[in-house]
Image (cartoon, helix red, strand yellow):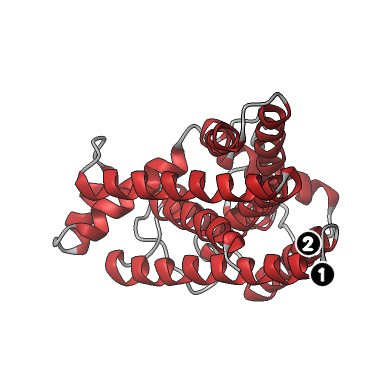
């Protein structure tokens, strides 16, 4: 079996990575041709691309409602709903399960068992309500500033959220279980590759802001830093609490990064 270069210079390797990213992180019809750690590495490096597409769809839906006269509140609700639909709600489910696991006073093994249960506990419900309210409130504020601000925020938050998954897959972050998505992608991304991908996304954030004002370019980059920092703190907590990452932890990291990015964009 051929190996995928971490730098992504091989066209078939990049296509395997894109299929892996879209096939695992979205509902788009991307047939996964390989399910191994080499494909997982390429897929997690391509995760921000999947986020960019989700963000564009989200922004298009919200902008359409805004143009039809719905007002910024309903546009914000639609913009928040689209990513949930395009991911089958898996990231929100992961957020709820992770909140229940972290909120329990059980040992790591029991906490992981709680996270695998199909029901949602009180910590999960609280986390879902607060995160969704924060996202809608932030987008309402940004759409109130103008269509361009809301659109840019939707695209950037979705992209940054998937970039957080790239970092959650880097070397040194183990899997908590021997099976599942967490196990296949854990410790697959070299730190250098994650850094290079981050630089590209930050450049996108700055360029998007420059389309508005130089201040927006700075604000976008600062929001990106806040989002990645919050995701890193949650990731560190989960690794200490559970012994590593799981698919649920990936969902929690993604939703945390998206929410913090949106909230940070409203500040200042």
* Figure check: 146 above or below 178: above
Q: Is residue 109 left or right of residue 174?
A: left
Picture residue at 71% right of the left edge, 28% below the top: 64
| Residue designated by label 2 | 209
Task: Give percent across and percent down for residue 122.
Answer: 20, 46
Please name whichever residue, 204 or 25, is drawn nearer the observer in this view of the structure.
204
Q: Secondary structure at mark 2?
A: helix
Up/down of 7 relative to 130, above or below = below
Percent x, y for residue 63? 71, 34
Q: Position of residue 83 (x, y in %)?
A: 57, 38
Picture residue at 57% right of the left edge, 38% below the top: 76
Tag count: 2
- Work out how far the residue at label 1 is from the one at label 2, CA to CA, in angstroms: 7 Å
Classify 10 Å Cα crowding around label 1: few (below 14), some (14-19), many (20 and above). Answer: some
- Which quadrant is the C terminus positioned in? bottom right
Asked if the residue under mark 2 is in contact with the one under mark 1, i.e. CB atoms within 8 Å, the reply is yes
Q: Nearer the viewer, residue 10 or 19?
A: 19
Would you identify the image quadrant in which residue 233 lies? bottom left
Q: Nearer the viewer, residue 60 or 245?
A: 60
Secondary structure found at label 1 = helix
Q: Label 2: how many residues lie within 10 Å, few (<14), some (14-19) or many (20+)?
A: many
Q: Which mark is residue 97?
A: none
Q: Residue at x 23, y 36 (%)?
A: 119
In front here: 84 or 238? 84
Tell me, yes or no, if residue 181 can be seen here: yes
Q: Residue at x 46, y 57 (%)?
A: 256
Q: Is residue 77 above or below residue 186?
A: above
Which of the two labelled residues, at mark 1 and mark 2, occupies the earlier sequence position?
2
Could you say which quadrant of the image residue 107 lies in?
A: bottom left
- Can residue 51 be seen here? The reply is no
Provide the residue designation for mark 1: 214
Q: Report the side of 243 relative to 139 (left or right).
A: left
């Amino acid at each position: 079996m051929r190996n995928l270069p971490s730098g992504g210079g091989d066209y078939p390797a990049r296509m395997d990575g894109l299929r892996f990213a879209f096939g695992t992180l979205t509902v788009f019809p991307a047939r996964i041709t390989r399910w191994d750690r080499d494909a997982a590495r390429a897929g997690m490096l391509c995760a921000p691309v999947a986020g960019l597409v989700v963000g564009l769809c989200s922004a298009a839906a919200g902008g359409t409602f805004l143009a039809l006269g719905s007002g910024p509140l309903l546009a914000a609700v639609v913009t928040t709903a689209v990513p949930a639909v395009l991911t089958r709600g898996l990231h929100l489910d992961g957020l709820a399960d992770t909140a229940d696991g972290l909120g329990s006073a059980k040992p790591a093994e029991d906490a992981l068992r709680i996270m695998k249960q199909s029901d949602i506990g009180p910590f999960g419900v609280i986390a879902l309500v607060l995160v969704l309210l924060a996202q809608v409130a932030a987008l309402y504020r940004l759409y109130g500033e103008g269509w361009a601000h809301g659109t840019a925020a939707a695209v950037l938050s979705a992209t940054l959220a998937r970039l957080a998954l790239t970092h959650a897959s880097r070397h040194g972050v183990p899997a908590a279980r021997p099976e599942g998505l967490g196990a296949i992608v854990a410790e697959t991304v070299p730190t250098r590759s994650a850094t290079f991908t981050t630089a590209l996304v930050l450049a996108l954030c700055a360029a998007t802001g420059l389309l508005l004002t130089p201040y927006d370019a700075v604000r976008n980059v600062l929001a990106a830093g806040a989002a990645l920092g919050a995701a890193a703190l949650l990731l560190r907590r989960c690794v200490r609490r559970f012994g590593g990452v799981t698919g649920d932890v990936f969902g929690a990291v993604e939703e945390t990064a998206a929410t913090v990015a949106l909230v940070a964009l409203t500040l200042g």
